[in-house]
Image (cartoon, helix red, strand yellow):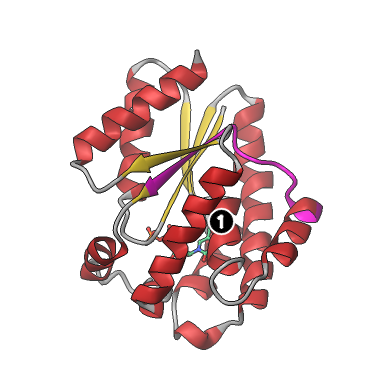
Amino acid sequence: MFISLEGIDGSGKSTQARLLAEALRATGRDVVLTREPGGAPGAEDIRRLLVEGAPERWSAETEILLFTAARRDHLERTIRPALAAGKIVVTDRFADSTRVYQGATRGDLRGLVDGIHDLAIGVEPDLTLILDMDPEAALSRGLARKSGEDRFEEFGLPFQNALRDGFRALAAQYPGRCHLVDAGRGQETVAADLLTTVTKALA
Ligand code: TYD
């Protein structure tokens, strides 16, 4: 099973992806925890081009190509081999991030995102958990980390609001695959909720 976690910056995705992987491993399952952009050595090299530097460093169109190049490497080197070996893959972000960050925030580029995705990637997760929360609260968490990977956080609050709307629209567009989860609650509550959803999907 291929599971993705999605959400705006600071929504707690990375922590929740780790907790989910740990909880699944505790039930005896073989889990590969991975992330985008990155998740394979070449893709991690591309990641640095994307998350560091000034916000205007790349146009949205160039970003689509770079994120897709990183995703293709991630798919070839990490995701496909793990799924072929019968493992569960939990990825912190996948193609829905490109649909929203590049496809819906700086003009309507969704057609370009979908076209390139169909040609170069062509797969979707079995289950996508979308962590939904107030962008203002999430942004204060995100920037507080000062990771040096703040390029997208620096687009500011209106950008994060557009992202939230974009993720909610995706959840409505793909109700079978996507589950919207209230991430404004305590970490343990959110983790329990995600595990219940995944356990149901696995059964
Ligand atoms: P991520 O490592 O998930 O950052 P965070 O843990 O802070 O949420 O992702 C880095 C940034 O890249 C994040 O701001 C979202 C952005 N991004 C895109 O714009 N498009 C994409 O396709 C992906 C995968 C990420």
Magenta residues span 119-131
Q: Residue at x 36, y 77 (%)?
A: 156
Q: Is 130 one of the magenta-colored residues?
A: yes
Q: Is residue 164 above or below residue 149?
A: above
Q: Residue furthest top?
A: 203
Residue 134 image point, x, y percent: 29, 58
Quadrant position of the N terminus in the picture: top right
For the question of whether residue 169 can be seen, the reply is yes
Q: Quadrant of residue 148?
A: bottom left
* Foreground of the two, 165 or 38: 165
The amino acid beneath tag 1 is Pro
For the question of whether residue 39 can be seen, the reply is no
Q: Is residue 150 above or below residue 58?
A: above
* Foreground of the two, 200 or 19: 200
Q: How many marks?
A: 1
Horizontally, residue 71 falls left or right of residue 29, namely right
Q: Residue at x 42, y 59 (%)?
A: 164
Residue 200 image point, x, y percent: 45, 18
Residue 202 image point, x, y percent: 50, 18
Horizontally, residue 88 falls left or right of residue 22, namely right
Q: Residue furthest right?
A: 119
Q: Is 79 one of the magenta-colored residues?
A: no
The residue singled out by tag 1 in the image is: 41
Q: Residue at x 37, y 62 (%)?
A: 9
